[in-house]
Image: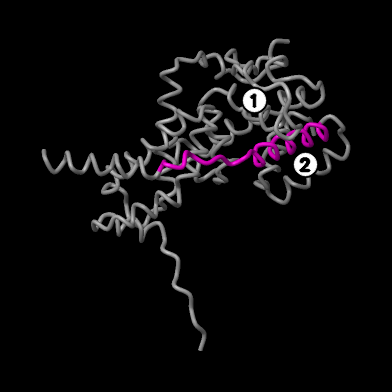
Amino acid sequence: MSVSKRPKLTDEDLVRQTLSGNEDGFAGLVDRYRDKIYNLAYRMLGNREEAEDVAQETFMHTFRALESFRLGERFSPWIYKIASNLCLDRLRKQRQPVSSLDEPIGPDQDIPQQVADWSHAPDQLYEVKEMRADTQDAISTLPPKYKVVVILRHLQDLSYDEIADVLNIPQGTVKTRLFRAREILRRKLARVYEGGMTVKEGVSR
Amino acid sequence: MRCQEVYKWLQAYLDTAVTAEEERIVERHIRACPACRQRLIELARTVNALEEAEDLTPRQDFTVRLRERLKQEKSSENRG
């Protein structure tokens, strides 16, 4: 006879515990999702303070809304939806000019006007760190609705289906936005890697 | 087949979201077309860079602060 390990609690178990008044349940959910939500918010907002704020808000909202969570459905898209909406709200409030970016991508019409300020970045960084900074910088210049799709796909590893669920948009729209976003990033990063210049300089061309 | 027509499959190819037939079309095309081959390499590198992005962690007191806020909210609910 084999000795079986105690099975790991599922998200749903933790939700049930929380709803029945057991505080360990919610602590378990926070433990499980804290870093994921924080990274999602950081990639969306590009700022650690704001990411902390949004991650806290996400869990507060989650706690308040938990009774409306339909048991049997997957928890992760549900909490990502709360976090994504909070991030998109913030970005909307920053009133960035993004409307023209709905147009199809034509030659050189793919570059948003808003460019992250990284004048404060230290001059001397290791190559890998620079690459990471370039990646984050390139992400930060994407229009919010493209940015969120790229982040959910490649940093949170969600499928087209799950992203459609989180954002409440058709799967076809997910693909269109993802493909456009990657095309924008490809062009930016290709300039960075090959030209040995920064994203900012690339954009000003 | 024209590059433009192949492009959407090239993108889906990265996510392994193509049918076997589309995969064959993409692979045949990129063997013959250096521009699309280069594009695919750059797209793959872009995806790689995204997926290798460093994971960050929130401040150490994140959970403590959250617990405090939840406690406050609950106690104000009880008072109300």
Q: Quadrant of residue A204?
A: top right
Q: Quadrant of residue B26?
A: top right
Q: Is residue B46 left or right of residue A22?
A: right
Q: Which residue is mark 1?
A: A138
Q: Is A29 drawn above or below residue B72 in the view shown?
A: below
What residue is rendered at 86% in x and 33% in y? B33
Q: Amino acid at mark 2?
A: Val
Q: Amino acid at mark 1?
A: Ala
Q: Quadrant of residue A131?
A: top right
Check the residue under mark 1 and report the chain it is in. Answer: A
Observer-nearest residue: A20 or A146? A20
Q: How far across and how far down the image is residue A31, in percent?
A: 43, 51
Q: Is residue B55 magenta?
A: yes
Q: How far across and how far down the image is residue A6, in percent?
A: 44, 73
Q: Residue furthest left?
A: B80
Magenta range: B36-62
Q: Residues within 10 Å of mark 2 (few under 14, many from 20)?
A: many
Q: Which residue is mark 2?
A: B26
